[in-house]
């Protein structure tokens, strides 16, 4: 997941009538996801997994690789811990994974 400009976050917040703080928190979570996964797996393997939503402490991600999906199951607790440490609070409570395209 690449960096998302604040302008796009604000526009989406206005269009969806969502609080800006919620949209900014989602953007922070997605950024933390990318940072942690690249640090743990490297950029090549991390490219197989992408966050799709974050709501009420649950981060949903999808994978285009069966091997990456299996590794997510193994590493899920470590990923959650690293993300929460990076975010400075216990924001990620659960990690929900799903397959895409296989």
Image (cartoon, rainbow, N blue to C red):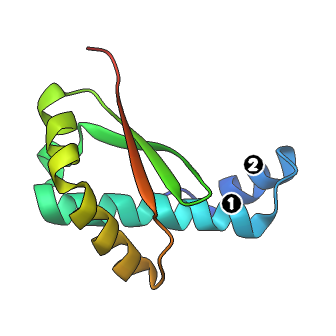
The image quadrant of residue 5 is bottom right
Instruction: Kindly identify which residue carries mark 1.
Output: 23
Q: Camera-side residue: 48 or 11?
A: 48
Q: Quadrant of the C terminus?
A: top left
Q: Camera-side residue: 76 or 12?
A: 76
Q: Going by the image, does 26 lie left or right of 11? A: left
Q: Which of marks 2 and 1 precedes in the sequence?
A: 2
* Front position among marks 1 and 2: 1
Q: Going by the image, does 93 lie left or right of 26? A: left
Secondary structure under the numbered disc 2 in the rendered image: helix
**Where does residue 98 sit, x and y in percent of width and height?**
36, 31
**Where does residue 81 sit, x and y in percent of width and height?**
30, 72
The answer to whether one can see residue 86 in this image is yes
**Which residue occupies 47% across, 51% down?**
59
Instruction: Kindly identify which residue carries mark 2.
Output: 12
95 is higher (above) or lower (below) than 36: above
The image quadrant of residue 96 is top left
């Amino acid at each position: 997941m690449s960096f998302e400009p604040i302008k796009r976050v604000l526009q989406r917040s206005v269009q969806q009538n969502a609080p800006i703080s919620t949209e900014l928190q989602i953007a922070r979570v997605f950024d933390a996801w990318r940072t942690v996964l690249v640090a743990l797996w490297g950029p090549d393997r991390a490219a197989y997994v992408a966050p799709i939503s974050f709501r009420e402490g649950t981060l949903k991600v999808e994978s285009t690789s069966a091997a990456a999906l299996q590794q997510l199951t193994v590493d899920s607790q470590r990923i959650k811990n690293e993300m929460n440490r990076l975010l400075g609070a216990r924001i990620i409570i659960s990690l929900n994974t799903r397959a895409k395209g296989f």
